[in-house]
Amino acid sequence: MDLREKPGKAQTLLEMLLRFRLIAVVVMVVATVSILAAKWDFLVGFPIAASERFGMWFAEMENVQGFWASSQYLFVAGLACVVLLFVFGGVRAGIASVVASFLSLAALYVLDGGEDLALPLYGVFALVSLGLLLFVKCSVACMLFPFALGWLFLSAVLTTLPWGLEDPNWLVWGALSAFGFACSMAFAVATGKHLGAGVPQAGAILKAAKQMLVPVLVGELLLVSAMAVDMPGGVNVLNSALWYVVFAAWFFMFIVPVSSFAPWERLRAGTRRVQMKDKKKKNKK
């Protein structure tokens, strides 16, 4: 009689995605290069336009009442996303997501529509991320460079979707970028926690990815719905559905598999800690 716990459908799907991770890398690189070659100006325009729109929106908020009137749905959705990351990812993952969200919004504020700053800022971020990946023994360091490449791919894909580069979609790009960064950092911290407990690299990545299922899928649904409600002209169901599908596919089909190429194994503890629930299962057997 086989007493081993059978993996669920979500775990089986994630295992398949990790098996074909090399395909994800090839698709991501080829698609990004192809789109950049044809739409480089449009891609650079996303952060510039988003930062301008964010600066205008920030300047219009004179008090708490004005802030609530202009972004009540988005604020509640963002708060719910953070709570989900705390509940399913853990305290450290939740804190990492809050810091990542703050840094993303701060980057938009600093950019402030500066055409000469977009590329240098991304270049510095990519180079620093690569250096941290190679020389720093930290879970966040293992995730920053894969996110930098994945963010470029996500932005490139968004330029090909049918809505075009028009307001208010600039802020949609900014919100999805911030949420993607927050989820990526939470995923990194959760993976590092499992590795610290002695779990093998593949198992740690799978466990962390399963922890991110609810925060990413439910949190993104709330975020996209809030943005659709706040957008002028009412809710565009088709665009909202496209945003949701693209972001979910990007995170689980590309970010998670591509991140598995990072040197996670150096974070793994020499001995594996067994939790009390695992001991109880063994005693019952």
Image (spheres, rainbow, N blue to C red):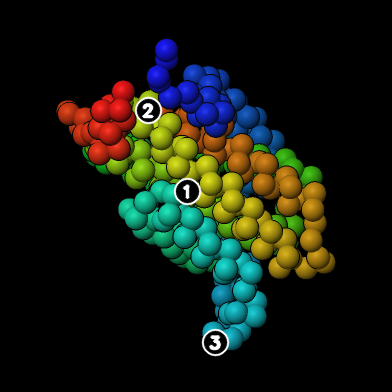
Where residue 162 appears, as percent x and y from the top left, is 79, 45
Query: Which residue type carries mark 2?
Result: Gly
Where residue 39 appears, as percent x and y from the top left, is 68, 40
Mark yes or no: residue 151 visible. Answer: yes
Residue receiving disc 1:
183
Residue receiving disc 3:
63
Q: Are marks 2 and 3 in contact (CB under 8 Å)?
A: no
The answer to whether 179 is drawn above or below residue 114 in the figure is: above
Residue 176 vs residue 261: left or right? Answer: right
Instruction: Find residue 211 and report its image quarter.
Output: top left
The Cα atoms of the two marked residues, 2 and 3, are separated by 48 Å
Name the residue: 21% across, 30% down: 272
Residue lying farthest to the right in this orientation: 233
Location of the N terminus (image quadrant): top left
In the rendered structure, find residue 270 and report the number of the disc placed on it: none
Residue receiving disc 2:
203
The one nearer the camera, 146 or 255, is 255
Q: Residues within 10 Å of mark 3 (few under 14, many from 20)?
A: few
The answer to whether 10 is drawn above or below residue 123 in the figure is: above
Name the residue: 49% across, 63% down: 105
Name which of mark 2 and mark 1 comes first in the sequence: 1
Name which of mark 2 and mark 3 comes first in the sequence: 3
